[in-house]
Image: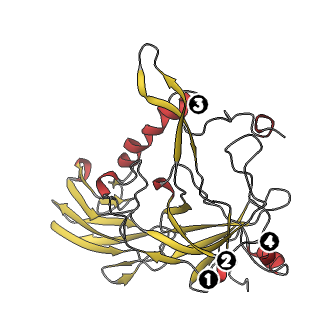
Amino acid sequence: QKCASIAPSEVCDRNFYGVSHFPCCITNFPQGWPKFAQSAVFADVTSTPSAVVVASLVPLFASVEVARANVSIDSRYPFGDEARVTLIATAPMLLRIRVPIWATRATVDGKPALNGTFVNIHCAAGNTTVLVELQPEVVVEHGWGSISSPPARSVSFVRGPLVFALGPSEERNTARSFNASPPRPLARDWTISTKDPWNFAVMLEHGATFQSQSSAGWSPSFAFKDGGDFPFSISIVGCIVSGWSYLPGSNITAAPPPSPVAVGACGTPRLLRLVPFGATNIRISIFPWVGKAEEQNRSARCENTLGAKVSHGIHFATAGHCQ
């Protein structure tokens, strides 16, 4: 089958768009930034006493006029694991801080904070500062592609709020330029491809190691610039699956092969570096995994559940009683 019949909504000779193809995405996407900032801090004047609610721990300063208070957050979230939240209040009030659902080891001023809840701090008039430590772990999520036929049962890697991906080196070719009036020289359609291998299955028995070192050119002031820099990474071990390739006649990757992939169908193990999804233009973020045939039934029982277990130094998002 040709690309056009498999993916009819796609333009098969390009994968990175300037203003064509889906113009609604190009214009609507930037709305996320002001709406995100708008939703980071709230006021709850219905509570007694009034409360300032911190919904996101991103660095900010907000004037909460209805509560007659200011709040500042000193952090590098989501690229840092702690935040200092300072409330400047004119009267006694509550400071409510949301603890993300993934932050199962979070503390506020050294005390355990239940994930998925709001921590209430009673503050006197004046300045109150609290330290939030999130202590995220590398989590392997099972069950991706479970509704496909046959089920792919792939895995993904996350840490805190960020999804990680394999980002191969890029080769860029202009598929279309927009030089008519008005000229838009930067709004090109690109074909971004790679000569690097990308069709890896993960060997989970080797674990996943968080690497805190950023690349030389990374800066939090432009965290996801278009140059391949990254704030930190995760190291895993994978091997090439030769039968996993592109859709015919395209640069669109085919669906991952069903897992587990037999050891004999995989190439030589090699060390792979995963970086945050937003630091890539082309990427693989869903991986097949290598295992024995009898592990398939165990994976089927574990996928799409909310519990957790730990194995080989990796935190697995699986059923709580899955062994």
- Say left or right for 258 vs 115: right
What amino acid type should be assigned to the residue bearing mark 2? Met
Number of the front mark, 1 or 4: 4
Percent x, y for residue 167? 53, 58
Tag 4 secondary structure: helix
Percent x, y for residue 252? 68, 45
At 58% from the left and 51% from the top, the residue drawn is: 194
Q: Which of disc 3 and disc 4 is earlier in sequence?
A: 3
The crowding category of the residue bearing disc 2, from other C-alpha atoms within 10 Å (few below 14, some 14 to 19, many at least 20), is: many
Q: Which mark is residue 265?
A: 4
- Quadrant where the N terminus sits is top right
Q: Nearer the viewer, residue 52 or 225?
A: 225
What residue is pinned by disc 3? 22
- Say left or right for 31 vs 197: left
Q: Nearer the viewer, residue 50 or 115?
A: 115
Q: Which of disc 4 and disc 1 is earlier in sequence?
A: 1
Tag 1 secondary structure: helix
